[in-house]
Image (cartoon, rainbow, N blue to C red):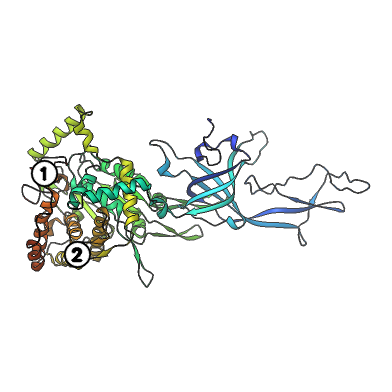
Amino acid sequence: MDPDPNPLNPSISSIGSAHLGKLVTISGTVLKAGPVKMFAAQKVFMCNKFLLKNSSDGSDGNSSSNYDLPMECPSQGPRPCMGTNFRPVDDGPGSACYTNHQELRVQQQLQCLEPGSVPASISVVLQDELADSCQPGDDVEVTGIVRAQWRPLFPGARCDGTLAIKACQVRSINSRHRAAAAPPEGLQEQFRDFWAFHAGCPLKGRNKILASICPQIYGLFLVKLAVALTLIGGCPRRDNSGAHIRGEVHMLLIGDPGTGKSQVMKFAARMAPRAVVTTGRGTTGAGLTVSAMKEGGAWSLEAGALVLADGGLCCIDEFECIREADRAMIHEAMEQQTLHIAKAGMVTTLSTRTSVLGVTNPAKGAFKHGSNCAGVAATSLSGPLLSRFDIVLLLLDQHEPTWDKIVSDHVLTTHQQAQQPFVRALHGWSVDELRSYVAWAKAACPNLTMSTEAEQVLLAYYQSQRRAEQRSQARTTIRMLESLVRVSQAHARLCARSAVTLQDAVMAVLVLDSSMCGSSLLGWSNALHTHFPEDPDAEYEQLERLVLAGLGLQEMVSAAAGGDDGGGVAGGGYGENDGNDGFGLGSQGW
């Protein structure tokens, strides 16, 4: 093993026999936490008429009953006692000293791993007041001494052991604050300059950021916007009664094969400061939440995907493959963002403050004869689970000759001219810059206020969906209004605003309206054929008037029509298309 460049703060995968007996500091995520046991740290033995006080070795992390006894009686009288037989003193004061003992399994942090590598883990022994100081899913920083942990010895068997750390200090790091750590000051200044440059055309600046998301896929404007809103999220709050209202945005992609769902999901995982990617095929409810493991005769809790993704993003591919009984286990984790565990006599509560990005295929026969349907009919998910997703987008692979030609030209250009400036320009910001921007947007706008116009638009859209004859009961509950608030707050954060404006509310209506189908205000049903507009700020004015008129807010339509229409910057040209194949707004489209 190569010597570690930082011997005092090595990674878990680099700890080896060279670190034995040395003080190290590691950072990782608690994967498994064993029960707190009683451990005899000291025990008194008697040899004839002399008492010998001897403390157990214990520093190697073993909680066995073996003690290091002297070879002979260490009495120092005139006539030394050379006895070699000792018996324990089981009664009387001071005969033994007991302490708390707990063993953890700490795993490398997923965001620190290289692509394709397997996370390493190591045992950590906690004693005294350190025991029961953290739970599965917590990010911890452990300082301790590396010891050898020997397995029980048997005649004729090879002596085998592993490395463990006897902790001297354990510091629990709040995963939310750790994931949202502010980027360097130089990068923050670049973000502020970026928005100062686009002060007169904020949507154009926003689309430059969105064009950097999954640039190898043409178009998908609405999907990329939804991904950015999911990663940034809204503002969580707690009311006077103590009820917690989540700020994380959950997103579900329902699409035909070959529409780029998995690529978008994996790119979102790379953008998130902390992400866990799993698949629904073969995954159980315990694998998504928490499982109880029995080891050495004792039960311990092992964190699942939602717990490990606390403070980040949990991506679940093939969501429809999760069994119905197992889907019910994630209801509490998605809405209340907690998990109440009662397994094997262990009762506890774990945090799951994570955004869920689910990807699923349509149900069989959902799109017969080329017809579109609402999200409820397009998937086999139950209504209670579907209502917990704030954004539900449909990606239908419909035959559109113009669209097919544009996409095929884009794919061929990407393969044949990968080194030309046009293809490199599609990438825009790097993944690291996007990840830093997500953290900066959350830190720069921790709390947002909402304008009166924005509240009126969100409330009017919610009421219009409730009145619709063809409304989906699963998508038009009171959770829909909360979703509108969260998505509008996320859009304000994306544009680096300190308040939710009318523009943010209109964009929230645009995103959520695409999954309403039968009761859609704008007539959207397929997010696959949405592309970047040439002049987003100018075309937004048309979208705003269309939304306000559809909601019956005539006085706001008059105010918008009488305002200044020169806020947009003409020319565009930064996007990925020629803007000739719109969907829902005539030839311009979004």
Mark 2: few, some, or many residues within 10 Å (few <14, many ≥20)?
Answer: many
Residue 493 image point, x, y percent = 27, 55
Indicate whether 164 appears above or below 473: above
Judge from the rendering whether residue 240 lies leftward or rightward of residue 469; answer left or right: right
- Residue 176 visible in this rendered orientation of the protein: yes
User: Which residue is painted at 36% across and 62% down in the image?
Assistant: 336
Residue 100 image point, x, y percent = 62, 56
Q: Which of the two labelled residues, at mark 1 and mark 2, occupies the earlier sequence position?
A: 2
Q: Are marks 1 and 2 in contact (CB under 8 Å)?
A: no
Indicate whether 260 appears above or below 288: above
Q: Nearer the viewer, residue 197 or 301?
A: 197
Q: Amino acid at mark 1?
A: Gly
User: Which residue is painted at 48% across and 40% down in the image?
Assistant: 120
Residue 59 image point, x, y percent = 65, 46
Residue 571 is labelled as: 1
Q: Nearer the viewer, residue 424 or 272?
A: 424
Q: Quadrant of residue 460?
A: bottom left
User: Alpha carbon of mark 1 to alpha carbon of mark 2: how far?
Assistant: 29 Å
Q: Nearer the viewer, residue 358 or 341?
A: 358
Mark 1: few, some, or many residues within 10 Å (few <14, many ≥20)?
Answer: few
Does dot 2 land on a helix, a strand or a loop? helix
User: Which residue is painted at 73% across and 45% down in the image?
Assistant: 68
The residue wearing badge 2 is 454
Looking at the image, which residue sits at the far left? 586
